[in-house]
Structures are given as C-alpha cells and as structure tokens.
Amino acid sequence: MKRFLCAFAFLGLLTAAPAQAQRLGYIDTEFIMGKMPEYALAQVELNKLSDTWQKEIEFQKKDLDKMYRNYQNEEVVLTEPMKKKRQDEILKKEQEIKAYQTKQFGYEGQLFKKRAELNKPAQDKIYEAVEKMVKAKKLDIVLDKASDLTMIYTNPTFDYTEYVLEELGLASPDRNQPAPKGKVKTVQPPRTPGTAARSADPR
C-alpha cells in the first residue's frame, strides 16, 4: 500500500510555478481508506484467507508434534538407520511448514499479492478523486500524511482530506476529522512455528 500512497505524495506538480508561489496541501489516505466500504470488504476477505492459511499451518504443526512424540517414544527400539530416516522425516516436515508459511505470508507472498489486488480498486478511486480535487483547488503539491514522509507539523488549514472524501461521496454532514496518524489495521502473519527451532535429533 505504501507504494501507492507515495505515488501521489507529490501529485499536483502540474504547473511550473516558482516554488514560493506554489500552493501546497496534504491529505490522509489512511483515514480516507478507512471510510471506504470496498476497503472494509477487502479487509474481511483478507482476514478470511489469513485465518484459513493459519489453520492449515496449525494443523501441520500438530502433525509435526505427533511425529516428534512418536519418535521420542520409539527411539529406544529403533536401529540407527531407522532413527536417521525418522529424523529426516521430521526435518522435512519442518521445512515444509516453513516453506508454506513463507509462500502464504512472506514478502510478496500470497497475502501480499492478494492485499494489493483487493485494495487496488479503492486506491484507484482515491487517486482519481485526488486528481479532481487538485484541479478544483488549483494545488501544485499534495503530500500524504499517511506515507513514510515525516511531517513534523501540519496546519489544518492545508488539510484537503475532506475534499477528497467529498469527491468520493463519503463526506459526512459533520465534517470528517482525521484522527492522529496511526497504523492501518491489517492482518498479521502468524508466528514462526515453535517447533521450527528443534534439531533433527531431539537429543
């Protein structure tokens, strides 16, 4: 999402006016996204996917624990070749769990891609609304309060968030007021399986 947010951090550089004459404003895309029904629906779907994948990981972890306990219980009667085989099976299972977790929750994994896909319609709407607002208000520079750009102080006079919400048809009778900047609530990847730190040989 941050790539998108930064994409129009300087949207509005539409004229070649001198720096001292440029009109500047800022918006809070994080606040705007939180007002959009399509964004809320996207989060619901993402949470469902995350829960499904997390349950699969938990199931696989239980299977791994069972394999480990069985090995411990039967170790005394196993020959060395049999021990090696069982250890290899446990190690392989651990690696499979790690690989699945990375595939689903890792950087550019399935959750990352699905989030980008589901959020794109809302992001496109915001971008179009910002373009219209910039032209209507004759702004030269628009910054995003929700981006990584550090904004030590922001004068509410230059906050154009409400105007973007109006373009989106989301303005309320009582003027929307962005809350203090915070993190967007998003699904979080599960913790690394506790059994991953075990060595192949439990002794």
Image: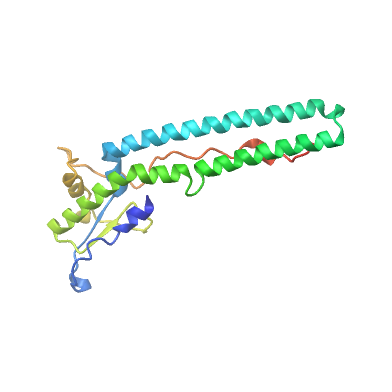
Q: Nearer the viewer, residue 152 or 36?
A: 36
Residue drawn at x 35%, y 42% as measured from the top left: 118
Residue drawn at x 72%, y 36% as measured from the top left: 89
* In the image, residue 170 above or below residue 154: above
Rendered image coloring scheme = rainbow
Q: Is residue 137 left or right of residue 112?
A: left
Q: Is residue 189 left or right of residue 148?
A: right
Q: Quadrant of residue 131?
A: bottom left
Q: Nearer the viewer, residue 95 or 143?
A: 95
Q: Nearer the viewer, residue 155 or 190?
A: 190
Query: For the C terminus, which image quadrant?
Result: top right
* In the image, residue 195 above or below residue 116: above
Residue 126: x %, y % from top left: 25, 49
Q: Is residue 92 visible?
A: yes
Q: Nearer the viewer, residue 105 or 157?
A: 105
Question: Total of numbered circles in the picture?
Answer: 0
Q: Residue furthest left?
A: 136
Residue 8: x %, y % from top left: 28, 58
Q: Quadrant of residue 17?
A: bottom left
Q: Is residue 123 left or right of residue 199?
A: left
Q: Residue furthest bottom?
A: 18
Q: Is residue 160 visible?
A: no
Residue drawn at x 47%, y 49% as measured from the top left: 108
Residue drawn at x 59%, y 43% as measured from the top left: 99
Residue 170: x %, y % from top left: 19, 40
